[in-house]
Image (spheres, rainbow, N blue to C red):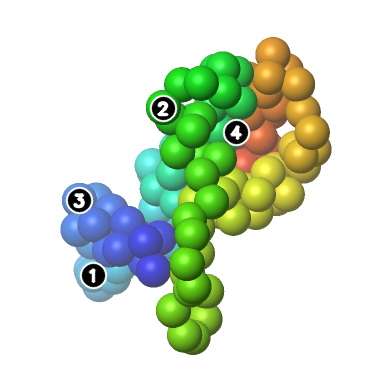
Amino acid sequence: MLDDFERKVLRRIFGLVNDDGRWRMRTNEELRLFYQDVSLSTFIRLQRLRWYVDLERISDDRLAMRLFQNQPHGSRPRGRPRNRWADAVRADMGSAGIPPDFDGQEGKRLVKEARDHWVSSAI
């Protein structure tokens, strides 16, 4: 859904194409070639992984780590469980090929490799 909005905005920015006197909208492939950067959803996934790597490197007594490790008490509401930030990080790590038990120092290198992988698959 976010990628759809991004393409809509890019089509508005780059405008129409005049092919032999006929105006047409740019294709998704043409937009990718013009823009030559990661999509907005990929950028969000990369930032989420970078924040997680930073979170893994800080000590357990810091507020950010305590909030991340906190388990709320009480019962959950009915229906489908809500997506949590940690679940999204785990899914991003899986799609990037990052092992769940990585070392904090090698995390930055792994995130850079994930970025290179996602950028090369997008272009």
Q: Is residue 55 above or below residue 22?
A: above
Tag 1–tag 2 contact (CB < 8 Å):
no
Query: Does residue 36 appear in the picture of this structure?
Result: no
Which one is in front in this view, the residue at disc 4 or the one at disc 1?
4
List the residue tagged with mark 3. Answer: 13
Q: Earlier in the sequence, mark 3 or mark 4?
A: 3
Distance from disc 1 to disc 2, alpha carbons, whole Å, reads 56 Å
Quadrant assignment, res 109: top right
* Quarter placement of the C terminus: top right
Amino acid type at image mark 4: Arg
Of the residues under marks 2 and 3, which one precedes in the sequence?
3
- Residue depicted at x 51% and y 44%: 70
Three-letter amino acid code at the position of disc 2:
Leu
Whichever of callouts 1 and 2 sits on the residue coming sooner in the sequence is 1
Residue displayed at 55% across by 18% down: 58
Name the residue that disc number 2 marks: 63
Q: What is the spatial separation of the Cα atoms under label 1 and label 3, in whole angstroms?
A: 15 Å
How many numbered discs?
4
> Dot 1, crowdedness within 10 Å: few (<14), some or many (≥20)?
few
Give the x, y percent position of residue 115.
60, 33
